[in-house]
Amino acid sequence: MTVETYKSSSGETIREPRGKSQNHTLNEIVVLVGIPGAGKSTLATARFSTHIRINLDTLKTLKRQDDALTKALENSENVVIDNTNVTNKSRRKWIEYAKKYCVPIIAIFIDTPLEIALERNRKREFPG
């Protein structure tokens, strides 16, 4: 499967799969949404082990995060975004990447009770 890249009339870079069937996509972006301690990283490693995990805590800077995402999408790899992503603004960035690389995007909201998330965070900060 190849990807055709061209510039739109407004100067934006557009990537379109060439010869893609309706039942096959080059890759996907999965956006995990939830408060700290919700279980996003656990879900990312357990359910999306074949995806490239993009996590700001691990990558440390927004530039590294963006570079890792760009590299994965350019290599037609599946991606899971493992950040809180609780605001529309934070999710909008991933939607723009999906549009730019012509890949499907889904969001998974992890609805964890606050008490459980707080307990998980306490264990992170002060391991027993």
Image: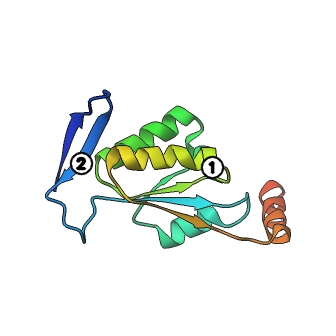
Q: Is residue 59 left or right of residue 72?
A: right
Q: Which residue is mark 1?
A: 88
Where residue 97 sits: x, y (%)?
42, 45
Q: Residue at x 23, y 48 (%)?
A: 16
Q: Residue furthest left?
A: 19
Residue 37 locus on image (x, y percent): 73, 62
| Separation of residues labelled 2 and 1 (CA atoms) | 26 Å
In the image, residue 21 sits, relative to residue 92, either above or below, namely below
Report which quarter residue 96 is drawn in. top left
Q: In the visual, does 48 lie left or right of 10?
A: right
Can you identify the residue that label 2 sits on? 16
Q: Quadrant of residue 111?
A: bottom right
Residue type, label 2: Glu
Q: Nearer the viewer, residue 44 or 35?
A: 35
* Image coordinates for residue 28, horizontal then vertical, percent: 38, 59
Please tell me how crowded label 2 is: few (under 14), some (14-19), or many (20+) other residues with Cα within 10 Å.
some
Q: Secondary structure at mark 2?
A: strand
Q: Residue at x 39, y 41 (%)?
A: 70
Q: Residue at x 50, y 72 (%)?
A: 47
